[in-house]
Amino acid sequence: MPGLRISFLSDYGLTDEFVGVCHAVIATICPEAEVIDITHGIPRHDVRAGAIILRGALPYLPPGVLLAVVDPDVGAERRAVAIRAGDGRLLVGPDNGLLSLAAELAGGASEAVDIARSPFRLEPVSATFHGRDIFAPVAARLASGIALAECGDPLDPTGLVALELPRPRHEDGALLARAVYIDRFGNVALGAEHDELAGSGLKLGRAASIELADGTSHTAHYALTFADVAPGELLVYEDSSRRLAVAISRGNAAERLGIAIDDELRLSAS
Amino acid sequence: MPGLRISFLSDYGLTDEFVGVCHAVIATICPEAEVIDITHGIPRHDVRAGAIILRGALPYLPPGVLLAVVDPDVGAERRAVAIRAGDGRLLVGPDNGLLSLAAELAGGASEAVDIARSPFRLEPVSATFHGRDIFAPVAARLASGIALAECGDPLDPTGLVALELPRPRHEDGALLARAVYIDRFGNVALGAEHDELAGSGLKLGRAASIELADGTSHTAHYALTFADVAPGELLVYEDSSRRLAVAISRGNAAERLGIAIDDELRLSAS
Amino acid sequence: MPGLRISFLSDYGLTDEFVGVCHAVIATICPEAEVIDITHGIPRHDVRAGAIILRGALPYLPPGVLLAVVDPDVGAERRAVAIRAGDGRLLVGPDNGLLSLAAELAGGASEAVDIARSPFRLEPVSATFHGRDIFAPVAARLASGIALAECGDPLDPTGLVALELPRPRHEDGALLARAVYIDRFGNVALGAEHDELAGSGLKLGRAASIELADGTSHTAHYALTFADVAPGELLVYEDSSRRLAVAISRGNAAERLGIAIDDELRLSAS
């Protein structure tokens, strides 16, 4: 019987050996485990970006273990945790909100343990590389079938750190939402489900107005897909994670419009 | 019995989660499939570079499924296809020429289906991420042993989009060829097989002249390998895909000479 | 029975298809082999960085084959080798020192063969891509259980190229050590074990002085981990490979202090 799969996300990047060493640790502990690298390109220390990507990927991940490490406070007081979600998924990582959006989508945390002193940690635990010494070993044990309760000390799942995302708001027929993620193509995902556009007056196929925090205003097409507008044109669309998003066909919207994470955009019919 | 292997190439990059989510989709549908990532670093939307890399890698790939996604027209009218080649390989991707060079090398397309409305697509199909919603699911089904004909609607394989590469030409004892691929080291592959040098007068171990489109002329060594010239020196050589190529030993030829894709180079004995 | 694992490190990067093609070659020769990518982000041609990373990763790698390619002299006279270490590990790569630190840590080379003309090489061997044509095929054969002696011509393991790392030295109560590796976060690993600090007068939790080759002097905290100092502050610490290291909490030490590989740092109590 194959071990469970481990889906792995981090901000380690692929330039150094951090990800590879975590893979090696997993392979040593649970040779049957298969690791799916969701991405290791989360911007350094950007817990929120990691949480958003993890939640977006969740519906496509096979059952098993989610291992996530974006950990600006490694070595500090933040807890290291393993969680069982309502749907049976197991999540392992720092208790800094990184796991919270995915856990919520997976039915909420039903059981949790503190794994900082897990019997399965690699000793001596380094002060700076808990991915290798705590998180990967525990994920590998869970994948091999060890019970969650054996991996650490029980803790109250209602006390886990939860992430608050900026919510969109409606104002004078416009929708105001913040940029929450920018991909490498410069496509800007907003902190709003596409369905939350309802009431903003935008009509598919029609022009939309985007006002930025810097006071500039831009005309976009509210379209289904990039191919619906000419190269270089701005569009508002539903991205593949069902979020409201802004992009430029064959261009880089974040760069050209100067949009940064957390900037508020005001969308209205134009 | 293990599933077939899936060799996967794209321009998704590894910064975002696109590749990881495609892996996850494949693992969910066909847990036994093993995925070989050829590269995901194809320059964004560069169908020709993708096609060239795919063809160059083909002789080394194990039998099975080729999944390739470089898709500037996602959401537009281009078809999504799965193809059987003469040698039995199965190729999945957009019908924009990306698969054509590899399919030709693999014996030509003998059977093809349109998979835009494949029964195996993930619904609702997003407008922007067909890798996840159409191509990866169909590749996974093929890897699990499902027949090609069950994956979509039959189409005439002679109608598939074919890519035309610039051909080299001989002129006054010189060989004129265009830059078709530049790797991350700045090595420039030309649109000519190494064997097409015959008749140009170049002799291995002797000096060669390279004239660029901007009128500048450079002296290079026609050599077997980098180690045959001093660091910093220019060489003309047969690259590992048997193409004619130009490089600088321990340097970046494209950068130093200012060569871009499609630039024509004129090679002659000097 | 599964094949042995192959741990793979190189300077190929992930932008091009080099790594993917090596994976494909391995999968074709030994379908059961599982490949762990340690990293392919070693700075181009930086044999020493590759050797250091390989040695640091070794204690975490599962038994099996180590395949490493950082090969500035491909095509030149350097040998291609496969080595058995005292602990049974098999190492494959160029004989330029890249394997030497890991081999030493693994108990020293007890047997070695020259694989340049291995019966398992892919012919014709290209002049520039021995990873594909020599190293990966031999690693795959070893993973499939072929004896080392069958992979090439025997050679005296005492004649293998060994790498000399700069040693730290003590002077007037200070420790002088050179920068040997800088990771993508700008953390600077020095050519000294953390334990070699003994005698320098540094006390954990106290201030330390770092003098650079350019004559500038900086105050740092000698701390256990990043979280022990305020964001933006400099620290001296034991990194996860037990080396002495210098970093800036949530910052880039190499960049801010202008430290490059081989620079000597002078550490003393301040």
Image: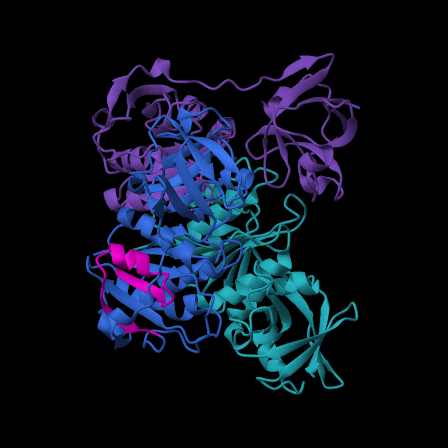
Chain colours: A cyan, B blue, C purple
Viewer-closest of C175 and C92:
C92
Q: Where is residue B258 in the image (x, y as percent from the top left)?
A: 55, 43
Viewer-closest of C195 and B249:
B249
Tell me: A248 left or right of C21.
Answer: right
Tell me: A38 left or right of C4.
Answer: right
Check residue B93 for magenta coloring. Answer: yes
Q: Which quarter of the image is occupied by the N terminus of chain C?
A: top left
Picture mark count: 0
Q: Which quarter of the image is occupied by the C terminus of chain C?
A: top right
Name, please, the residue furthest toward the front. B172
Viewer-closest of B36 and C59:
B36
Q: Where is residue C27 in the image (x, y as percent from the top left)?
A: 28, 46
Residue B239 seen: yes
Q: Where is residue C202 in the image (x, y as percent from the top left)?
A: 73, 23
Classify C67 as above or below A265: above
Q: Where is residue A216 in the image (x, y as percent from the top left)?
A: 76, 71
